[in-house]
Image (cartoon, rainbow, N blue to C red):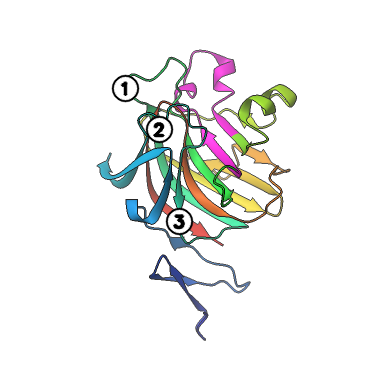
């Protein structure tokens, strides 16, 4: 519902949220609460914590589900097509994680009802300052599950769907994802220029929900999620 003043009122999970519209009618942004009762978990445990000065939602891999392909905290009652997703996140290898763990952490969008089809940008924090240029070049990644996992994209189009960005495991990283039509851009650390540009989103569905995403062997934290639609 929209008032005469241009304020749009929406119900999100039973909570009234206000967002001021621009002249073009787009959302100026809405803060999305991050709490265990506001997400549907797939292969992860979630817990509210205070982490490095922020109230955050912690995600860890659910015990006994190390082979689970999807590890998501799916936002309830939210539909997203085009717009902007902003969040502070941090990822690091969990205690006892396997050698190849990188602290994989990111955001999935256009998540479908089956929770196996989605687009995603994610980071590999331990690659950011690795003493190996090839690993550094693999710091940021785009994927589209289930048809286009990282290894298929790397094999078929090396270097096109991943790039370098400076990262430190366990530290807060500001991430912004801008989705428009069939393309998306990833911005990191408040930069005005994108870290990664994707002009051909692979998923046929152009609408879905949003999910917090982690990879195997990761402990991650998320805070200050805002969505502009």
Q: Secondary structure at mark 2?
A: strand
Is residue 130 shown in magenta? yes
Residue 211: x, y in percent? 49, 47
Q: Is residue 130 visible?
A: yes
Q: Secondary structure at mark 3?
A: strand
Label 1, label 2: how far apart the Cα atoms are: 12 Å
- In the image, residue 64 sits, relative to residue 195, either above or below, namely above
Badge 3 is on which residue? 226
- In the image, residue 71 sits, relative to residue 34, either above or below, namely above
Among numbered discs 1 and 3, the one appearing first in the sequence: 1
Among numbered discs 3 and 2, the one appearing first in the sequence: 2
Q: Any mark on residue 95, and which?
A: 1
- Residue 154 located left or right of residue 2: right
Label 1, label 3: how far apart the Cα atoms are: 30 Å
- In the image, residue 172 sits, relative to residue 77, either above or below, namely above
Magenta-tinted stretch: 117-141
Task: Locate the C terminus by quadrant.
Answer: bottom right
- Tell me what residue is drawn at x 49 percent, y 22 percent: 127
Residue 69: x, y in percent? 52, 32
Residue 163: x, y in percent? 61, 29
**Of labels 1 and 2, the one closer to you:** 1
Q: Secondary structure at mark 1?
A: loop
How many residues crowd mark 2 within 10 Å: few (<14), some (14–19), many (20+)? many
Badge 2 is on which residue? 91
Extreme-front residue of the structure: 64
How many residues crowd mark 3 within 10 Å: few (<14), some (14–19), many (20+)? some
């Amino acid at each position: 519902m929209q008032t005469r003043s241009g304020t749009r009122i929406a119900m999100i999970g039973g909570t009234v949220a206000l967002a001021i519209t621009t002249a073009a009618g787009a959302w100026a942004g809405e803060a999305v609460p991050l709490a265990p009762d506001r997400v549907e978990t797939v292969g992860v445990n979630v817990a509210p914590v205070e982490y490095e000065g922020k109230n955050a939602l912690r995600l860890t891999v659910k015990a006994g589900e190390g082979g689970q392909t999807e590890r998501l905290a799916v936002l309830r009652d939210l539909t997203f097509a085009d717009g902007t997703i902003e969040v502070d996140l941090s990822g690091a290898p969990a205690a006892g994680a396997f050698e190849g763990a990188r602290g994989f952490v990111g955001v999935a969008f256009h998540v479908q009802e089956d929770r196996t089809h989605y687009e995603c940008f994610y980071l590999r924090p331990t690659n950011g300052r690795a003493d190996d240029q090839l690993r550094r070049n693999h710091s940021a990644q785009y994927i589209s599950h289930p048809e286009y996992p990282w290894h298929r994209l790397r094999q078929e189009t090396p270097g096109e769907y991943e790039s370098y960005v400076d990262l430190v495991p366990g530290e807060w990283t500001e991430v912004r994802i801008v989705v428009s039509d069939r393309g998306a851009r990833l911005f990191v650390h408040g930069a005005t220029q994108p870290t990664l540009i994707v002009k051909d989103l692979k998923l046929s569905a152009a609408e879905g929900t949003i999910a917090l995403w982690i990879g195997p062997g990761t402990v991650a934290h998320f805070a200050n999620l805002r969505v502009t639609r």
